[in-house]
Amino acid sequence: MPRLFGTDGVRGLANGLVTAELALELAVSAAHVLGHPDRTPPTGRPSGHRSTAVVGRDPRASGEFLESAVVAGLASAGVDVLRLGVLPTPAVAFLTELTGADFGIMLSASHNPMPDNGIKFFARGGHKLEDSLEDSIEAHLGSGWDRPVGSAVGRVTDLADPAERYVEYLQKAAPTSLAGLRLVLDCAEGAASIVAPRVFAALGADVVAIHASPDGLNINEGCGSTHLYPLRAAVVAEGADAGFAFDGDADRVLAVDASGADIDGDQILAILALSMHAAGQLPGDRVVATVMSNLGFTLAMRQAGIAVVLADVGDRYVLEAMRTHAVSLGGEQSGHLILSDHATTGDGVLAALRVAGEMAATGRSLTELAGVVTRLPQVLVNVAGVDKSRAASDPVLVAAVDEARAELGETGRILLRPSGTEALVRVMVEAASRDQASAVAERLAAVVRRQLSS
């Protein structure tokens, strides 16, 4: 049986894979694993304390019934629940730490289309779970347990002013005045709508918010970080200095400069790295990126005297590498940016605030700041409808990749990997020219379809 957890929790079609029954069972299992009385209690809290969990969600309609199922499962297992309502994923991580909760749960499918949903877990302190804890939660599904009764059942309350607490935190984490900047924010009809316009305006920016009226059905629909064309048009039409696009749960961000040109996660990471390096805030002069990062980013960092540590794709793996190498900044090309001095997970709003702050503090345009990275042509082909579990072992496919690598030599790079969140295989090729990158990528994609078809 395939592992239920992917690279970022459990994700799939709501009422398909992600049912109310599964949500309830996962909540019960998480209560037993993450809220177990044998686990070391927080400082000052005696063993045997009542466990507490915070629960948040993005605006998608299925989050309403999934939230009810999760809350019911937790309370039935004796866990007190603090409901947060609609908030970004990093806000749930932050409030897990702030409230001293034993764990947190976020209901979101991030950038996926509205019909999908997912269940993400945070351990104490707001950190993503290690694989071993996820495996333990999965292993406990369906296990027998003694149900608490009477006063031992969990109580459910709504946390007061959760959005205000998160906005206040963001203002302290990115205190630079943004006065004089006109910025467009694409909130993806998602959780960013609740906080992003407020905090940018509070710091003095002239804000134009688009796709900031979520109705539960329109999240990520032709907008946000996976659909940048509305942001490009809005930035140019509004005469804005820049635009930032978030995904459905606001844990990632991409940008657009004043001309409407895209600024990807590698370039945003470079801007943050150089700013922190200049301020002496980059321990060890190192930054963590992923195997999907463009070679141009690595070359720019090398030129600046900053070493790049590569991690697997997924912000949890970026964070693991950051901890291992004592690095305070990491990110992905897709727009997950982690500033561990301020956050325990990727935070799109925080990263956008820091980039805008660099623009305001230096007087440099986003185009100029991002221009430090000269991106090599990179082509990504997503191959759906194949058995992604065999991507690394099929001998014909392995031979085809080896042959292509020999063809590119030191002027290019190939990455072929199964998606951790979707049923497809990703083929990424970098080369000296876009034509060569496209030709190699399509050739390998054809081999993937032929060899891995179900």
Image: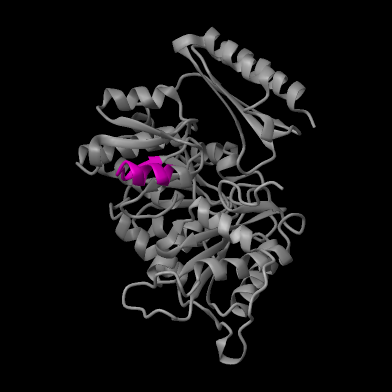
Q: Is residue 299 left or right of residue 92?
A: left
**Towards the viewer: 429 or 202:** 429
Question: Is 199 situated above or below 437?
Answer: below
Question: Among all residues in the image, which is located at the extreme top?
Answer: 407
Question: Is 434 situated above or below 42?
Answer: above
**Residue shown at the point (64%, 47%) measured from the top left:** 112
**Measured from the top left, where is residue 450 in percent x and y?**
76, 21
Question: Is 116 situated above or below 412?
Answer: below
Question: Among all residues in the image, which is located at the extreme right?
Answer: 454
* Res 400 quadrant in image: top right
Question: Is 2 situated above or below 215?
Answer: above
**Measured from the top left, where is residue 225 in percent x and y?**
55, 42
**Residue shown at the point (41%, 46%) measured from the top left:** 319
Question: Among all residues in the image, which is located at the extreme left?
Answer: 280
Q: Can residue 244 be seen in this view?
A: no
Quadrant into which the C terminus falls: top right
* Res 429 quadrant in image: top right
**Residue shown at the point (34%, 29%) measured from the top left:** 368
**Residue shown at the point (36%, 59%) measured from the top left:** 170
**Towards the viewer: 281 or 59:** 281
**Measured from the top left, where is residue 317 in percent x and y?**
46, 43
Q: Can residue 449 be seen in this view?
A: yes
Q: In this view, does 245 lie to the left or right of 44?
A: right
Q: Magenta includes 320?
A: yes
Q: Magenta includes 231?
A: no
**Measured from the top left, where is residue 179 in percent x and y?**
31, 51
Which stretch appears magenta? 318-330
